[in-house]
């Protein structure tokens, strides 16, 4: 009868606790619809790998990228965030296990006989001062009947996935910035070569104009114009030093290397490579590979678990506890059989009337889940837009580079013909000067366009999330786990 009454009391407590607030709302989190292909992607599939979009053949990139992965401060910070998330998950898992402790105490007590309200019987005598010695082993455990602690642990585990994805995003961003800096450095080197050729040609024209001036075949104005063109080339060459300093500073920030060592590595000779065709990739790869999408999916999973934990706080919380110890009033009696004491307890606590507190917490957790889902959708469409932009930039940059190469070749041929005609007395000096200037300018713009085409490929590598990685779980695939609710 007593057992039935206890069960009835516990069931009534659970029902009352559940009445504090209703269940959590169902929030649908479907994977966004993706197009079957990218609009600007190549029509024909190529055998180009995603890794080939980076300047893998550049010795400076190979050496500096290893240093970035090994010692970049931003990557070390991201790794520390992963360790923090793992520690939090271990703590959440430990909350589901019993807690065992120990304590020891020595307590002195003095009693006033007058507190008993009168004179004690003659035969009743007790010590007014007493010292108690105790030692206990304690244990407590929450059986988590309604899964609140289990949901908290799931939240913490999902945040590990989010921290791991954030670290991958940092790694990809660092390698992209490094690759872009090296490509910019190589573009500067190519522009410097074109400008140096411009300067050499201008100096040669100035020398030839000086010879013709001294021979009385040309006015001195031709020599002055050629010298002005040479000075213009010198100023443009000098301006490149500003860009070089900026690039060295950027690489120092990325690699934590001294500027002198960075400059020495960047000065390594480059193996000239052609532009690789862009690989044809599918939009579904974004969900499995892009770090910001993986992170958003993991955070959505975490918020779903947090909502489940918050909703289960409206149910009763059970706690089991036990104490086994020794209690004696003399050190010599501490290990006597009569000194053994113990306590076994079970408790249940549930909210009855909280005036909307639990319901407000559930509503707040639901709003956070909706925000996380919106952030996840935004990450997916941001990825789609970034890849489309990268493909479009590759098409435009390749077309511009091909046009500039044709322009450069034509301009250089025209400059050679003008120089030949000038030496033969069939063209004036202004024609030679303009043809030379057009040829050198087109060469510098072609070098810049080649760098822009290479940077567009780096942008595609970053937009797709780097080299495709094998999936490890549903969260890593960029799809949030099914709701626990």
Image (cartoon, helix red, strand yellow):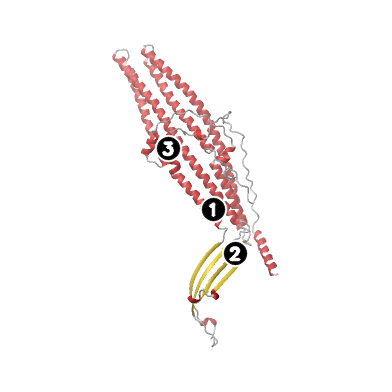
Q: Where is residue 51 in the image (x, y as percent from the top left)?
A: 51, 35
Q: Mark 1 and mark 3: span between their CA atoms?
A: 36 Å
Q: Position of residue 65 (x, y in %)?
A: 45, 38
Q: Mark 2 and mark 3: span between their CA atoms?
A: 59 Å
Upstream in sequence: badge 1 or badge 3: 3
For label 1, the SS is helix
Upstream in sequence: badge 2 or badge 1: 1
Q: Where is residue 396 in the image (x, y as percent from the top left)?
A: 52, 28
Q: In which quarter of the image is the N terminus?
A: bottom right
User: Which residue in the rendered view is the most extreme toward the left?
Assistant: 214
Could you tell me if the residues under marks 1 and 3 are in contact, i.e. CB atoms within 8 Å?
no
Residue 237 appears in which quarter of the rendering?
Answer: top left
**Residue tagged 1:** 89
Label placed on residue 320: 2
| Mark 3 Cα-neighbour bin, 10 Å: few <14, some 14–19, many ≥20 | few
Label placed on residue 63: 3
The answer to whether 5 appears left or right of 124 in the picture is right
């Amino acid at each position: 009868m007593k057992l039935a009454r206890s069960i009835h009391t516990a069931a009534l407590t659970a029902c009352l606790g559940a009445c504090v607030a209703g269940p959590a709302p169902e929030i649908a989190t479907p994977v966004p619809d993706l197009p079957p292909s990218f609009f600007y992607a190549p029509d024909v599939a190529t055998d180009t790998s995603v890794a080939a979009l980076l300047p893998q053949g550049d010795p400076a990139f190979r050496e500096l990228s290893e240093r970035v992965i090994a010692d970049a401060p931003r990557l070390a910070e991201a790794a520390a965030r992963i360790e923090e998330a793992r520690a939090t998950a271990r703590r959440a898992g430990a909350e589901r296990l019993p807690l065992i402790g120990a304590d020891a105490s020595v307590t002195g007590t003095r009693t006033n006989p007058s507190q008993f309200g009168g004179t004690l019987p003659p035969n009743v005598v007790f010590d007014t001062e007493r010292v108690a010695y105790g030692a206990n082993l304690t244990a407590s455990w929450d059986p988590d009947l309604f899964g609140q602690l289990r949901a908290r642990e799931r939240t913490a585990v999902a945040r590990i996935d989010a921290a791991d994805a954030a670290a991958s995003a940092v790694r990809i961003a660092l390698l992209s910035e490094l690759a872009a800096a090296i490509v910019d450095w190589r573009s500067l080197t190519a522009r410097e070569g074109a400008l140096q050729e411009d300067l050499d040609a201008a100096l040669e024209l100035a020398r030839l104009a000086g010879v013709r001036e001294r021979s009385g075949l040309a006015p001195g104005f031709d020599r002055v114009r050629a010298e002005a063109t040479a000075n213009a080339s010198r100023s443009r060459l000098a301006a490149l030093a500003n860009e070089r300093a900026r690039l060295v500073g950027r690489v120092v920030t990325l690699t934590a290397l001294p500027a002198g060592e960075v400059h020495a590595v960047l000065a390594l000779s480059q193996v000239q490579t052609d532009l690789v065709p862009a690989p044809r990739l599918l939009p579904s790869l974004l969900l499995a590979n892009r770090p910001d999408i993986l992170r958003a999916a993991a955070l959505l999973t975490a918020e779903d678990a947090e909502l489940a934990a918050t909703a289960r706080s409206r149910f009763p919380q059970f706690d089991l506890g036990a104490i086994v110890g020794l209690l004696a009033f003399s050190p010599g009696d501490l290990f006597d059989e009569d000194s053994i004491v113990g306590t076994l307890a079970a408790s249940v606590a549930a909210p009855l009337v909280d005036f909307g507190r639990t319901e407000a917490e559930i509503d707040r957790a639901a709003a956070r889940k909706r925000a996380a889902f919106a952030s996840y959708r935004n990450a997916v469409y941001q990825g789609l837009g970034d890849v489309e932009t990268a493909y479009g930039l590759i098409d435009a940059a390749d077309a511009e580079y091909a046009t500039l190469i044709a322009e450069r070749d034509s301009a250089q041929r025209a400059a050679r013909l003008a120089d030949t005609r000038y030496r033969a007395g069939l063209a004036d000096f202004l024609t030679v000067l303009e043809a030379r200037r057009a040829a050198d300018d087109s060469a510098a713009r072609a070098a810049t366009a080649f760098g822009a085409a290479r940077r567009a490929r780096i942008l595609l590598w970053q937009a797709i999330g780097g080299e495709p990685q094998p999936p490890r779980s549903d969260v890593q695939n960029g799809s949030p786990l099914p709701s626990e609710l």
